[in-house]
Amino acid sequence: MQLKRLIISITLLLGMLLPQMGIAQSIEKLPIDPAVKMGVLPNGLTYIIRKNSEPKGRANFYIAQKVGSILENEQQLGLAHFLEHMAFNGTKNFPGKNLISFLERIGCRFGADLNAYTAFDETVYTIMDAPTDMGKEVIDSCILILHDWSSNIELKGSEIDEERGVIHEEWRSRNNAGIRTLTALLPKIFPNNLYAHRMPIGSMDVVLNFNHSAIRDFYHKWYRPDLQGIIIVGDIDPAYVEGKIKEYFADIPAPKNPAERFYVQVEDNKEPLNALVTDKENTSTQVMVFYKHDVMPKELDGTLVNAMINYMNAVIGRIFNERFEAISKKPNAPFLAAGLSYDNYIVARTKDALSVFAVTKDGQSEEALKALAKEVRRVDQHGFLKSEYERAKKAVLKAYEDMYNERGKRSNGSYIEEYKNYFLKGGYIPGIEMEKMVFEQLANSITLDQVNQYVKELITDKHNLVIAITGPEKEGIAYPKEEALSKIYLAAYNQDVEALQEEASNEELLDKALKGGKVISQKEEKKFGTTLFKLDNGITVRILPTDYKDDEIRMRGVTEGGLRLYSNNDTDILNAKLVNQVIDLGGLGKFDELALDKALTGYSASVDVNLADYTTSVYGTSTVKDFEKMLQLTYLYFTDIRADKQAYDVFKQKMIEQLKMAERNPMSSLGDSIASLIYDNDLHHRSLKIEDFDKVSYDRMLQMVRERLASADGFNFFFVGNIDPKVAKPLIEKYLGSLPKGKATPKMDRSKEKMPRQGVKTLAYTKEADTPTAITMDMLHAPFTYNLKNKLVAEILNGVLDQVLVASIREREGGTYSPNAYANLSKDPKNFLTAQVLFISAPEKAESLNKVVYEELDLLAKKGVDKMYVDKTVTNMKKVYNENLRKNGYWMNVLSSYYFFNENFHDNYLKTLESISAKDIQNAVKVLLDSKNKLELYFTARPNETAKK
């Protein structure tokens, strides 16, 4: 549909609303946040800078390019992405691997803090959490890196050739059913359009064979300042950073006679487009309906019209998704899940779409398509209900209220993503103060009738439609004919439907009088600055006020006793595997799950119960204002978890469908293969099977969780955040004090926990799959004393192994894309150290690459560990530790570890970390190799081969 009619109606509406809102013009651009320093250099480079102190002493540095795979010609397919890789393989001021090495030396990890991505219309390079508290040299160097990425990537022929294998392995690791399906779908829904043939990974024929000049030509043609934006947010001096940008980027000239940065237009279709794509490894069936629309006209981008459309899209999405969720929870629902959103049309920057989508059971795509049509028609015919609009409005405004209340502690990452999107896509960045005010005025001015009129405009055009179905290619799963999809949808849409009925409910979450309890002792503890309350029902409460967030309170209650209490028979072990997933199915108190969600609309409070192997925990989070609501939810979880057999039956059917779907993924059995190798088919460690659902009992699962919450005696509660113990005390006495007191669970015996298999064992599995792939896993384990130093030794070993594997089997051998290492020290049932290595490769390279892995381990044990690897890892750990000191989640872990688990990994952390040498890491590797506990798994997927063990 052309957007003109919609914009006219919106503009007329705004003309009526503006006097009420005290705003003169709807087509004026919303102002840029005054805290943002923004400018354009003479060469065309845009920069956006903001000072922000969360986290302190850290900053994020981005360079965003309006360049992506859509700009490639036929000889360059995949080179936009290839160029992204080359940015880390040598630049003018950081030749070779010096760029990565420099950032690792200051504590940034490659992958986590240093990364990039390439899409159809953009390429973005990121340096996250750079330690600006180490001095201006760090700031200068990070800006210099952005400068080099802009125009001084080396692109040496030898480095290009070495990177070909890495990218081929990236293709292998990602060439799954989802990517293959999208690749096949795009030509059908983007007919005669470049978007159909520009997947960023590109053509492996091009990647493995292109001439060096092809990537250099692409680089020099498109990487230029008029298409680039420098975005820096963090604990910096904006004036200093602006000066450095001007100094460093002044040597980059404005392009002469630059190639036009074209944007591929997506045509409207006069008749609906239909697409059906199947793949034998697809795990699920998806049904998608797109109502195509023009993008926001340039003259209205960033104006009040833009904000108004965003507000109404948010409201519409919220209401539709609430309706879809309610349908999905009914018995024999036509889909497993469904949703609606308004955004870019799939991957196109030049066309928007209202997207309606569903995930269905096998063979039910037609039913789902008809159901989507029915619900869209219901809104077209009857509109939304007043109660729905009020909830949606409340939810949208609550999100802005929460952001506003937390505005002083907003993270660098949140800001920089907002500014990146502004540079690449447009929109507005007026600051949360103005944005909240605008949305409140819109919400208070726009009526339900106006929202209903707007949504009808979105779904009016029955020709500019796209209907797509994707799913598994399997005998017995039927689909409608491709050419019939739109006919089926429109035929269902043209049927009259009844209006939705909803009974309004204003019931309170908890309306009964509680007897409450009493704090029988109170103490100020100097250790961590906590306030201790002991209640008369046996609960211990510790409160740690912090200023790390302005509007966050975190809660954890933990007690002894968990799922391993229910290990007397195989059936209970299976029941225990499902307990945490069924707790919420029935809702709480007098509210079923859907009613509870509605009752909590407009509140920022949530609570979850989790039964671990040996403990039971209650987790919660809230804003300051909604602290009492969090305590009410906590009380209900302890006293009134609601059973709903119908909800369980729907859940059970969905789980069975998901397990059926997973079986089509050749990698789905990898987890069980690893568990079989390590734990010798122990039932506790294997995943659920379809046949298990014939053995389990919903009543028994609820009995388990109710038993674990039957007594509050022995629970240790911790509260961390913007909380005043004096204000919290009467609420804690009322709600936690009212919890039942029974017999506390004694400490469980952990000595019966299954240890990893001893000795040497190799298992090999083969599956059928379209892409030849091998997944190789190695695990070594050995007894190792459990203490702070050895915990840190294990963490450093993890970092060292990551670097060694990247340098060897990725960079030197070119045999894998992203090798993974994992080292950990476990306490139960016996103290032991484990090290795991996992990588994906071509099947024919698996054994030779694994040989390299063991050669590298032998070198570490015999010749020692390169001190550089240790220093880089330790520097990163120090950086992360200092960042964690200003996070509520970190202090929650410190308190629960110290006061409940009797572990102290906070005191002496830095002193212990600095005491660890390369020799300590070498010794850990020796211990692992000398233990002779070596487990190997070769998991191979090949085309047209019978699966076998």
Image: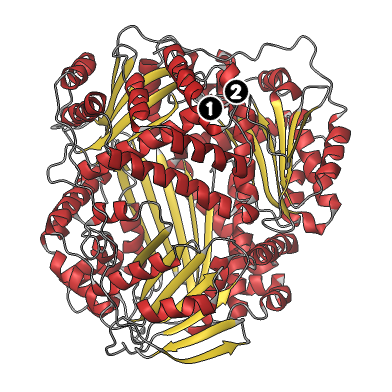
Query: Looking at the image, which residue is at 21% across and 28% down?
Result: 378
Task: State the mark number for residue 25.
Answer: 2
Figure check: 871 above or below 311: below
Of 152 and 316, the residue lying toward us? 316
Is residue 948 visible to the viewer in this orientation of the structure? Answer: yes
Amino acid bearing label 2: Gln
Task: Tell me where residue 734 appears, x and y as whole percent.
Answer: 37, 79
Q: Which residue was labeled with disc 1?
A: 18
- Seen at 42% across and 76% down, the residue is 731
Query: How far, Cα to Cα, is label 1 from label 2?
Result: 7 Å
Q: Is label 1 in a helix, a strand or a loop?
A: helix
Contact between marks 1 and 2 (CB within 8 A): the answer is: yes
Callout 2: SS: loop
Task: Please name whichever residue, 913 or 931, is drawn nearer the observer in this view of the structure.
Answer: 913
Please state the horizontal and vertical placement of residue 220, each as a whole percent of the image.
73, 20
Image quarter where the N terminus lies is top left
